[in-house]
Amino acid sequence: MAAVLQEFPAAQPARVELRDVSLRYFTPAGETQALDRINLRLGAGEFVSLIGQSGCGKSTLLSLVAGILRPSSGQVCVDGAPVAGPTPRVGYMLQQDYLFEWRTILDNAVLGAQIQGRDLKLARERAVHLLHKCGMGAFLHHYPRQLSGGMRQRVALARTLVTEPDVVLLDEPFSALDSQTRLAIADEVVDVLRTEGKSVLLVTHDIGEAIAMTDRVVVLSRRPGRIKSEHHMVFGGGRRPTPLEARARPEFNDFFRTLWDELDVHVEG
Ligand code: ADP
Ligand code: MG
């Protein structure tokens, strides 16, 4: 009996786990149920995207994982421990880059580490390394206003990674960029996050981005957000294709059609 049990080691705790998580917002105008009994696991090194109509609770879900909001019911855990507030283990990158215009790129990149009271010398070394990796090595002493939107997002990514989170939350990080820049930056961001071994939760309203960038796509229903379905983005031929390569694969179109139907988009007017 003992020998049999040894063949089934305890399941590894998920990096992120949401168990029956619901979230209601209370405002003077009334109550809004944003999420309804969400169950979701994110494994170590796994990339998962969340797609769903505007207002279905995607950002709310990320804020719960980031420890900015507490669930109305259910539990959110990171590495098996309930989330009690923001933690350095979880990095959050938003659509807006929130770079400070009066600080250089390097000083912006170390900001999070500085706020966390980390060793500034180490943080600067790590920031220089990451900015080089993100293709921003030549701009360390520039100011944000001297950069394009795509470059600013690269700096925001480096800043998120300087604090060495295990989990990276990305909330529509490319939605303000033009389409060519989006394609290029998606490749770079995935490359950096994969080599750094991060677990990633990406919110996007762009089906193609979800397919190209992540291992699994979770579709949320209209508000209150419930998990409608999950889809594994399995591409044939060994190594996972880069986002740009994925778009040229025959599987891409099949996934696109499936997800489009799942999203059930209605154009109004
Ligand atoms: P998404 O990111 O999918 O567009 P959100 O998570 O931002 O959706 O919002 C989900 C729902 O909760 C929406 O109906 C939104 O209006 C509502 N909501 C979001 N934030 C708040 C808040 N701070 N107070 C009250 N309602 C909110
Ligand atoms: Mg949102």
Image: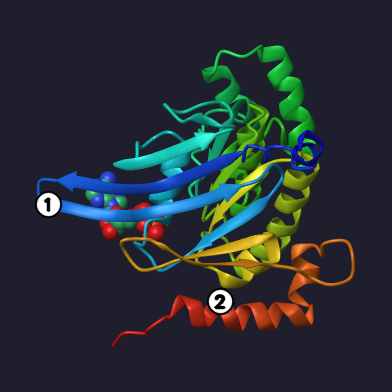
Name the amino acid, label 2: Leu
Query: How many labels, in total?
Result: 2
Crowd band around label 2 with a 10 angstrom C-alpha radius: few (<14), some (14–19), many (20+): many
Which quarter of the rendering shows the C terminus?
bottom left
Residue pointed to by mark 1: 30
Helix, strand or loop at label 1? It is strand
Residue drawn at 54 percent across, 18 percent down: 116
Say the numbered circle drawn on residue 44: none
Residues tagged 2 and 1 counted as in contact (Cβ below 8 A) = no
Q: Is residue 186 above or below residue 259?
A: above
Residue identifier under label 2:
259
Image quadrant assignment for residue 195: top right
Name the N-terminal-most of marks 2 and 1: 1
Q: Residue furthest bottom?
A: 269
Specify whether tag 1 is near ligand 1 (CB below 8 Å).
no
User: Quick one: which residue is furthest to the front in this view?
Assistant: 1
Measured in 3D between alpha carbons, the distance from the residue under mark 2 to the one under mark 1, in whole angstroms, is: 33 Å
Q: Quadrant of residue 75?
A: top left
Residue in the foreground of this view, choosing between 226 and 267: 226
Few, some or many C-alpha atoms within 10 Å of disc 1 (few <14, some 14-19, many ≥20)? few
The one nearer the camera, 19 or 183, is 19
Left or right: 263 as drawn, with respect to 165: left
> What's the residue at 66%, 14% (across, down)?
120
Q: Is residue 20 left or right of residue 203?
A: left
What x and y, as percent, mark residue 36? 34, 56
Q: Give the answer, above or below, for where 122 lies relative to 220.
A: above
Q: Is mark 2 within 8 Å of ligand 1?
A: no
Residue type beneath disc 1? Gly
Q: Quadrant of the N terminus?
A: top right
Where in the figure is residue 217, as x and y percent of width and height?
59, 64
Observer-nearest of 2 and 43 = 2
Q: Position of residue 167 (x, y in %)?
A: 61, 38
